[in-house]
Image (cartoon, coloured by chain):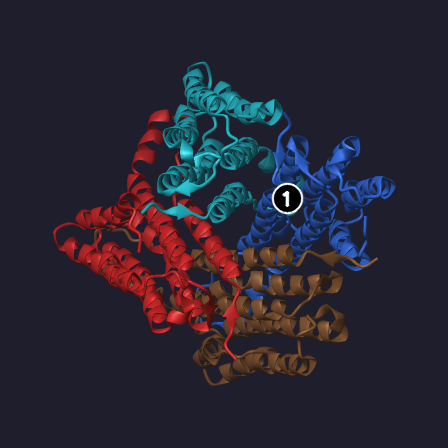
Chain colours: A cyan, B blue, C brown, D red
Amino acid sequence: MKTIFNKTRVEAFSDGIFAIIITLLVLEIKVPHLENHAAAGALSTALFELFPKFISWIISFFTVAVIWVNHHKLFKQFRQLDHGIFWWNALLLLWTSFIPFPTAVMGDYPGNITSVVLYGSVMALMAMSFTLMRWYVLRNPDLLEGTTDIRSFRKGTFLSLIFGPLLYLAGIALSLIHPYVSFAIFLAIPVYFIFAENES
Amino acid sequence: MKTIFNKTRVEAFSDGIFAIIITLLVLEIKVPHLENHAAAGALSTALFELFPKFISWIISFFTVAVIWVNHHKLFKQFRQLDHGIFWWNALLLLWTSFIPFPTAVMGDYPGNITSVVLYGSVMALMAMSFTLMRWYVLRNPDLLEGTTDIRSFRKGTFLSLIFGPLLYLAGIALSLIHPYVSFAIFLAIPVYFIFAENES
Amino acid sequence: MKTIFNKTRVEAFSDGIFAIIITLLVLEIKVPHLENHAAAGALSTALFELFPKFISWIISFFTVAVIWVNHHKLFKQFRQLDHGIFWWNALLLLWTSFIPFPTAVMGDYPGNITSVVLYGSVMALMAMSFTLMRWYVLRNPDLLEGTTDIRSFRKGTFLSLIFGPLLYLAGIALSLIHPYVSFAIFLAIPVYFIFAENES
Amino acid sequence: MKTIFNKTRVEAFSDGIFAIIITLLVLEIKVPHLENHAAAGALSTALFELFPKFISWIISFFTVAVIWVNHHKLFKQFRQLDHGIFWWNALLLLWTSFIPFPTAVMGDYPGNITSVVLYGSVMALMAMSFTLMRWYVLRNPDLLEGTTDIRSFRKGTFLSLIFGPLLYLAGIALSLIHPYVSFAIFLAIPVYFIFAENES
């Protein structure tokens, strides 16, 4: 007998995880320690030195917000959730819940190519989980809502491969020019999703 | 085709983030380290030295609670959520989720003007996100519930600019007298909302 | 015009905060640092030294679970939530969200009377918030469900004063005998609620 | 009069706790500190040294996901929740919320038998809580949905004892061969649940 999951509870569980991750990101930014507690200039300087941490926090914040939007759009197309889709979703949650770590590494080592490779790889794996979940559903089309257009869902799956793992891998490759080029790509990906309003 | 978001899921996602932030605030208050574990007097003294941290925690706790109330009142007036309103809401969540950092800085450097400027600026940006979300809705009035009075919504938007970003900027300016005057303003703003019971 | 809050959203917000606090408690127990990573005996010894932290974690875990149960029982009796009840509830959430701090202090300084006074005082203030919320509702009985028996609600309010703030204050006073007597009281209070199954 | 809990609120409270725990696990992986911030090779090496932490994180991530699935399947069979079932569920939440600690210990001391015993014991206690909750329900069968087959529920309870506490105790015993054998068992248990799709 196949297990059917309660879609509302799986969505609430996933939403809870997304909400916690997006909020935990800021915990990686630590208050600087100064000897002279009254020195306004020294505190300003110390805060400006945290600039790479603020940038990596903002990139990850908008990335997780875009994950939420794409998850929301995808799940709206599902009629019901079986065992398989639950575990492909768990894989997505695994990589998403890992995001605070590469974000913190990128904030601490902004000019280091290893940071770029780590950050881009985790994001590529996260984005790949979306594509894998879509492939699974294409092989089990009875999981989709009756109103879903299979051809446009297949096209969306193909696009999720390009505007996801492949773009993140391209971002990693561009670190050969400069790590900051990669970061610009990593920021551009969620910004594209925010302004494109793509329906798939 | 325009994306329509599930209002209940966006509210639950936002509520989750507010609940996490309000709870994380206390994590910034660290247990003091003492050599003599049995000395009751030394522990009392060490706890009293954390006084500025308790104050900044309480200010931020009530500020986030007021954000929740104002968010709740605002969303009650929305009929549906489109792509634009989702991202203005995400901007509000960005600044709100950042609050634990300036709270911790203010607790560590209570008499430092840089703390005041940082805390007040983050709060002004958070409050400004409310005003921007309202402006967006005023330009897209089909997003409002049919029962909403547009004139009173426009007035509420104007008031949200004054009792929000402008008051926080005034609070920053008053640090020229003394940083503690600013903190009094930052505490007075949520206290005003608690006792005013304004409907807008 | 009086504000009426959406009871489901206030409950979900409160439940979210309770769930986060009960989970954060364990973060205060830090992994011990040893030079020799393979020494099983040294690691066992270091873990046994964390015993007071495990005890204070368990006391606070069951206390927060009892808070959830009592909150759940109380809110079932409310017909609707107004501005006042929201802020009395926020006061309860304030003290509840503070619990990780006195728990960590008690775990670090188990034999120190200051820990006892801090822990007991925070719990007394949290419990007092329940009593204050009940008093507010007694003065605004239109907030109660029609099926609620006012006399039994008044009796429950009186009992909440005794089996709450007064018992915690008694626990503090008993630290004059020994701090561990106080901890036994602080543990006995939630255990009483678990086994008593009191309906009020 | 017996207390009847709102099943939806208890499920939401439990789901919230599961979502928070699964997300907190990654916080135990700390960013390595290097003198030379630009050295890509040194950062790679430092990240590879975190390998045991990544493994223990993944084991615990999938374990908590399996707990969620088993909790979801079990609660679907409950008609209503009384005082007793709430507190057996609270015991499950206690041990589940403790998981970040043994996970961090295992990541820091991967070859240490004490880590194995701690991790396996906490998991055995967590799994035992499932069995105890099932036993309680078997003694109070009016709590089950009318559609539940008591014989298959009894069989599932018996299996939960074997594929739970007993398997974890076996995992601990196998550390006599090598701690890594135990870790393989601790990973195999959730993997078994992921691929077995057992209905009980």
Q: Nearer the viewer, residue C154 or A155?
A: A155
Residue A33 seen in render: yes
Q: What residue is drawn where x is 38% and y is 62%?
A: D92
Q: Nearer the viewer, residue A101 or B104?
A: A101
**In which quadrant will I find the N terminus of chain B?**
top right
Q: What residue is drawn where x is 28% and y is 56%?
A: D119
Q: Position of residue B168 (x, y in %)?
A: 76, 44
Residue B43 seen in render: no
Question: Position of D18 compared to C95: left or right?
Answer: left
Q: Position of residue C175 (x, y in %)?
A: 50, 81
Judging by the rendered image, the residue that carries numbered circle 1 is B96
> Can you tell which quarter of the image residue B195 is in?
bottom right
Question: Position of B76 compared to D5: left or right?
Answer: right
Q: Position of residue A104 (x, y in %)?
A: 46, 37
> Can you tell which quarter of the image residue A161 is in?
top left
Q: Chain of mark 1?
A: B
Q: Nearer the viewer, residue C170 or A34?
A: C170
Taking D89 as reference, is A107 above or below it? above
Give the crowd class for mark 1: few <14, some 14-19, many >=20 residues within 10 Å.
many
Taking C11 as reference, is B40 above or below it? below
Please, what secondary structure does the residue beneath circle 1 have?
helix
Question: Position of A172 compared to A193: left or right?
Answer: left
Q: Nearer the viewer, residue B47 or C123?
A: C123
Q: Amino acid at mark 1?
A: Thr
Residue reaching furthest left?
Answer: D177
Q: Position of residue A38 (x, y in %)?
A: 66, 47
